[in-house]
Image (cartoon, helix red, strand yellow):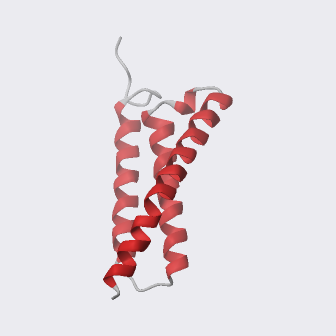
Amino acid sequence: MVMKLGSPHGSRVYWVTWGALLALTVVMFLVDGLSMPRLAFLAFVLSAMLAKASLIGAHFMHLRFERRPLALMVLVGLLLTGTVLFVLIAPDAVRIAAMNHR
């Protein structure tokens, strides 16, 4: 079976998604060098990370072709896993930051 470039399964979708992910990564890297309020920086970075995760889930995990309940289940699972990992790592980051300020 030959897939056309414009079909939903064609490689063009993956290249465009890769380009969008690369662009978001570069913008995140550039924003890191700016002097901006910490809360605004965190809001931007978290929004960009959620956008990247959505692109990956929709295009590379093919969730855009699945029924909504399955896609929501995967999304909630990813967000819960990320939250658990953050909660487990954050205390160490705070402790290390406090040690560096002594």
Apparent side of residue 97 relative to residue 54 in the rendered image (left or right): left
Instruction: Work out whether 60 lies above or below 55.
Output: above
Quarter of the image where the N terminus is located = top left
| Residue 97: quarter of image | bottom left
Residue drawn at x 34%, y 80% is 99
Residue 22 at x, y = what percent? 34, 55
Residue drawn at x 39%, y 52% is 21
Instruction: Work out whether 98 lies above or below 60.
Output: below
Instruction: Work out whether 74 lies above or below 34.
Output: above
Residue toward you, 87 or 25: 87
Residue 12 at x, y = what percent? 37, 36
Apparent side of residue 53 relative to residue 99 in the rendered image (left or right): right
Apparent side of residue 102 relative to residue 37 in the rendered image (left or right): left
Residue drawn at x 48%, y 60% is 48
Farthest-out residue, top: 1
Residue toward you, 49 or 26: 49
Residue toward you, 43 or 10: 43
Residue 3 at x, y = what percent? 37, 20
